[in-house]
Amino acid sequence: MFCLQGYAFSCAAWADDFLLLPLLQYPHLVFYEKFGDDMQRIQSFADRFRLQEILTAVHPMDMAALIGCFLAARVTLVYGLSPVCPALLYGFCLKKRWDWMGAIGSILGGILLCPSFPPVLGGVLTAWLALQALRLDWIQTNYASLARILPLVFGAIALVIFSDGTLYTILLGIIDLMLIGVFGPIYGMAFGALQKALRRRRLYEGEQYCLMALVCTSILFLQNITLLGVYLDRTACCLMVLLLAYFRGPIAGGVVGIALGGCAAMVGYSPLIIGGLAICGLCAGMCREMGKLSVAVGFSLSSAVFLLFVQDTGEILLPIMEQTLAGAGLFLVPRQIVGVISRVMDRPKDRERHPTQSASDERGRREIGNLAKAIFLGAKAMEKGNESAQIASQQMGALAVSLNHMAMRETIPLQNTIKRVEAELADGGYGDCPVSAAKDPFDRLTVTVTCRGCGGKRDCVKVIRRYISRAMGQDYILAQRPCRSGQQESCVLQYAPGPRIALEVSTACSTKPGMRQSGDTFLIADVGPAKTAAILCDGMGSGKAAKEESSTAAQLLLAFQRAGLGAKPMIKMVNSIMASRNRDVFSTGDMVVFDLAGKSCEIIKMSAPATFILRQAHAHWISGKSLPMGAVSKATPFYARREVEVGDYVVMVSDGISDCFTSNRELGQWMLGIHQQDPSVDLMSQRILKEAKSIAGHQADDMTVAVIKVKSVV
């Protein structure tokens, strides 16, 4: 757009100081306070952009790959970018729910990169799109994230400095570099949805907009960027043909290849490109049944044939390298690091999203803290009086029971929910519709809207459903409509949460030979709306003492989780209570908290074996090092968060099973083989236990396995 070669290299040197030096020279900024005021300013910058959190959450090799992407992006600055990049970023990353507005925003972003588009009008559109996103977030959560605010700030700065001269070129280059450096990784979030669709071989509702926006903006954007002098728009066409062939088959791939080839021939390419793209689509579509690798091989071979027709023999290597780099840059490089950095950047910092709910949570935490302190002092007094240690264990059990009762009495404040829905409806022109909220017999939060003059028509029902879903943060469906669809008077519409994932659980356990009781304890229960916790604790040793220790730890973890405490404060409080008893029997802690609405899980471990996620033909494991509960008063738990999909199997085991194998990889492959033969959770748990006992022989310890299957709710 703007061939601003002069400012590109000066801004590139500034980018080294602003982006790369804090990443490369100061990986542990908090330990360099003695360097004075300069170090304090760097520390403030790191805190604002969360560099320390990113550096600790991202693998060093992934960070090196990301820095390499930044350096490669600087090459594109030779050809200039524009201050309208936030419009493209809005459609790709900031619009989290893919719908027609997000697709239009993405396509607009690509169009705005064309040289003929007025830059002032582009800046106005950018500000409007960013304001829309900021307003929607504020209505829903009373909180605006950094990812929403910065594009608006950059767009405003670009509009203010829109004038000829050196100041314009320098500041424009700074804005472009900040957009690449801060939002470049989040750009890949759109490809996350596409990767899931590739694994499923089908598109879910809303993902077709993501694919359409991705293809259109790729074609428009790549036409203005070159790699070693070779334009990349042909690669974008090949990518579109490959995707359509994979999703729809060889006929669709061939037809799309002919259509795109015709468009390319009209703008100056050789007519042979029509046949080349058609061959690409046909070959890739015919190989789709053999898996993604076969599709890639078929596409590569057909692409080579296509290049033989279009390019001269001596120039064939450069386009093949171009396609390889484009594929790696779009799909492989940001695959892992994008999710980590985007979650760190989007995480609320020092403030709660819902003030009303926050006040209720804080009050509950104070009550729990007072109760725990009273029990702690009672346990100390009994130790001084040389009372039996069994009394202290009973007090811990009483604490767990009290916390359970306290959590069951807590109710969700409905007033805040009603305000959010009313604000969303008023924004859509339904401000005169009374709104109420209540819980149904299944403990689900339902929303009732009395709409005047709507009469329950289908279009009105869909519009109100969309507003309610946006306000509630999850999909809501029409549950009841006690009026006819053709009436024009008032109608009562009741909406309930849409389908969510569910869990199917099976457990199996055995006792160490010669012992009457197992030292393992497994609990699974609902801990909140759309949240289920699975807890496996293993007391040190075997027998009654180990059973009491693991049971107390499991009940405390469940009680504190129901009370709404965060993972780290919860573990620290339980660990401090158990360590205060000065007993030699400890307990491991392994907890998986499933978010049934968000399709994710939190994994907290205290010296527990790895947790396995069996997905398709792969076994993934999550493990971490930490001390058992009760060993020391200030132990730090291991924490991780993973997404789960329908069809996943989450397997939790005690050390009696994990110790039978030399590595987690060996244990995961063994579980995967059992899963492929017996996919039923009941058969799978029984067989895991049976074969583990056979492997351990006479040295078998207490063994417990829990197999949890993630399934959809229709």
Image (cartoon, rainbow, N blue to C red):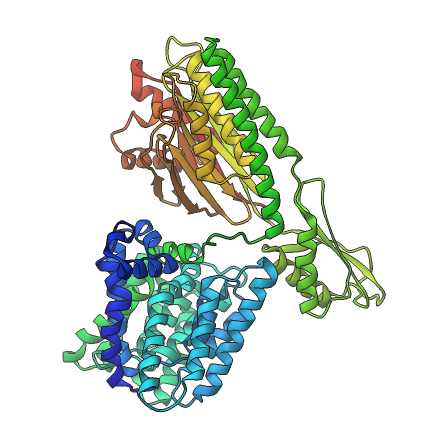
Q: Nearer the viewer, residue 227 or 53?
A: 53
Q: Is residue 374 above or below residue 258?
A: above
Number of numbered callouts drawn? 0
Horizontal relation, residue 157 to residue 20: left or right: right
Q: Residue furthest left?
A: 314
Q: Quadrant of the N terminus?
A: bottom left
Residue 482 in the image: x percent, y percent? 81, 55
Q: Quadrant of residue 629?
A: top left
In the displayed structure, would residue 238 be above or below residue 312? above
Identify which residue is drawn at 31% across, 49% down. Answer: 56
Instruction: Determine the image quadrant of residue 672.
Output: top left
Q: Position of residue 397 (x, y in %)?
A: 54, 20
Measuring from the top left, give residue 492's x and y in whole percent. Answer: 79, 57
Would you say 511 lies left or right of 279 here? right
Residue sitting at x 29%, y 35%: 664
Residue placed most toward the observer, 659 or 23? 23
Depicted 97 relative to depicted 678: above or below: below
What residue is shown at x 56% (from left), y 37% (from top)? 365
Q: Is residue 12 left or right of residue 508?
A: left
Please state the horizontal and vertical placement of residue 499, each as a whole percent of the image. Answer: 60, 49
Q: Is residue 615 above or below residue 342?
A: above
Left or right: residue 591 compared with residue 607:
right
Residue 332 can be seen, yes or no? no
Residue beneath the point at 32% across and 71% down: 280
Q: Is residue 404 visible?
A: yes
